[in-house]
Image (tube, coloured by chain):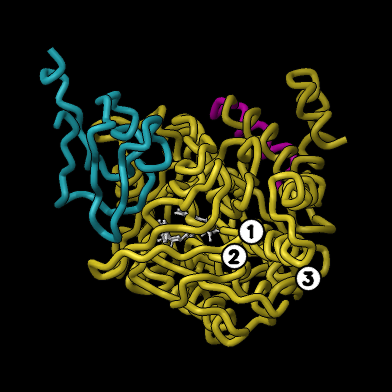
Chain colours: A cyan, B yellow
Amino acid sequence: MMLTIHREICGYCGACVSVCPEGALELIDAYLEVDEKCISCGICTKACPLGALEVDHEGRL
Amino acid sequence: MKDAYDILVIGGGPGGAMAARTAAEKGLSVCLVEKRPAIGAPVRCAEGIGKELLQEFISPDPRWISAEIDSAKIIVPDGTSLQLDPQFAGNEVGYILDRKIFDRELVWKAAEAGSDVQVKTRAVAPILENGTVKGARLEFCGKVKDVTAPVTIAADGVESKFARWCGIDTTIPIRELATCAQYLLTDIDIEPHTTVFFLGNTIAPEGYIWVFPKGERSANVGIGISPRCCGPGRRPKDYLDRFVADHFPRGKPIECIVGGVPVCKPLQTTVADGLMVVGDAARVSDPLTGGGIYNTMFTGKLAAEVAASCIAQGDCGCEALSVYDKEWRKSKMGKAIERNYKIKEFFITLSDEKLNALVKSISHINLKEFSTFTLVRELITRNPKLLLELKALKDSIS
Ligand SMILES: Cc1cc2nc3c(=O)[nH]c(=O)nc-3n(C[C@H](O)[C@H](O)[C@H](O)COP(=O)(O)OP(=O)(O)OC[C@H]3O[C@@H](n4cnc5c(N)ncnc54)[C@H](O)[C@@H]3O)c2cc1C
């Protein structure tokens, strides 16, 4: 998976879910899940109020 | 929980609760499901609402009112402040709620009216028959159950996954999400009946910082900004921490919350065959202020009313349900969203210098009515040049 969720930072607010163009993120109460629909576009990393999401761009090569 | 209801409501926020309550009061069988283990927590809100707006739905109760508000202040980068006092001095114009209790009260009222309520129960997929929504697959404590209903109301908040699963694009354009962080700070010096808004591109780019009193010496101190301006070291929490260090260095946070508010246009359609979308899920929060409590309650109630008459007539297709979509768009709320969207688009272009100049032009005004509308009208009256800059702004308030 190229999207890294820093769970120690995540505030499980769902902001990222709302901007994901692929519907790849799902919040299960306090647990954020990312599925295979993720295209590592990085949009969610900008939406996160805490900076809990990171896209590993090297993984794209 | 039964296998079938008249109405299935997804989400236990104020939108879902109002829908469930209204439907139950109309004698329909209703089930409300909430994926979190507790209604109302964690809070994702600054908890402010206009007094009259709230009273449209429920009589105020001290058990869930943290503070009464009688004035507001806007502070711009050079420190100039604009004090807004309602003309009828002494009239409280707003409340700061205690949403942990408020949200529970609303769900409790739905339950009391006869609705079933299930917490820790997540809708994981719609039940679709030939493109018509017929209910949802629910997951709770490791069990899976299909619950059918002629009408499903998606009140699943900012995430809005349910309508997406049904084929409605609910994605918020990234620049039109307000990304937010907030502390409940205690032991701070505040004006306990005044809400304060700090504007400026350095402290809160394309957004604002709010101080909403929660008592004599505590307040929700939060920020909402555009993700466009975010990056490492420039997240909402970073901006907020800097502000708090400057303004409330001795404040003690007893709660830290984050969240996202849609400040985009509402969904293009809020109905489909067997489906209605309300509240944040429908993106009907106010694009200028980010306020959504009233709008979500309004749409939740209206959706249930329309659903009830559609069920009575035996037609819950898109066309029949679209009465709801049309009604909210032409309501006062719908018009305000349209107008405030344009005003927001204008305000986010303003430089700090412009903001300073604008506020200087009206340092003290007495508004007849306490609203962004009257404020903007006043701003324009005193700054006719504004109109040249953006015709849309004029159109939006004329
Ligand atoms: C930081 C911040 C400050 C704000 N300040 C204000 C303010 O001062 N005044 C104001 O009016 N508004 C404010 N708002 C906006 C306001 O909080 C929202 O508009 C309001 O809560 C929307 O209500 P809702 O019922 O539509 O959604 P929510 O209150 O978000 O409720 C949706 C519920 O659905 C549940 N859910 C989601 N998916 C599923 C699923 N698949 N199955 C079951 N349940 C599900 C969620 O867990 C959630 O409990 C603020 C928002 C934020 C983030």
What's the CA distance linking mark 1 and mark 2?
A: 5 Å
User: Label 2 near label 1: C-beta < 8 Å?
Assistant: yes
Quadrant of image for the N terminus of chain B: bottom left
Q: Secondary structure at mark 3?
A: loop
Q: Which residue is mark 2?
A: B194
Chain at tag 1: B
Task: Identify the residue at image location x=83%, y=37%.
Answer: B397
Q: Which residue is mark 3?
A: B89
Question: x, y percentage for residue B331?
Answer: 80, 51
Quadrant of image for the C terminus of chain B: top right
Chain at tag 2: B
Q: Is residue A15 left or right of residue B26?
A: left
Q: Which residue is mark 1?
A: B72
Q: Which residues fall within the magenta stretch?
A: B350-364
- Please say whether residue B359 is one of the residues in the magenta stretch: yes
Q: Answer whether residue B216 is visible to the viewer in this image.
A: no
| Mark positioned earlier in the residue sequence (2 or 3) | 3
- Please say whether residue B216 is one of the residues in the magenta stretch: no
Q: Can marks 1 and 3 be said to lie on one chain?
A: yes
Q: Answer whether residue B346 is visible to the viewer in this image.
A: yes
Q: Secondary structure at mark 2?
A: strand
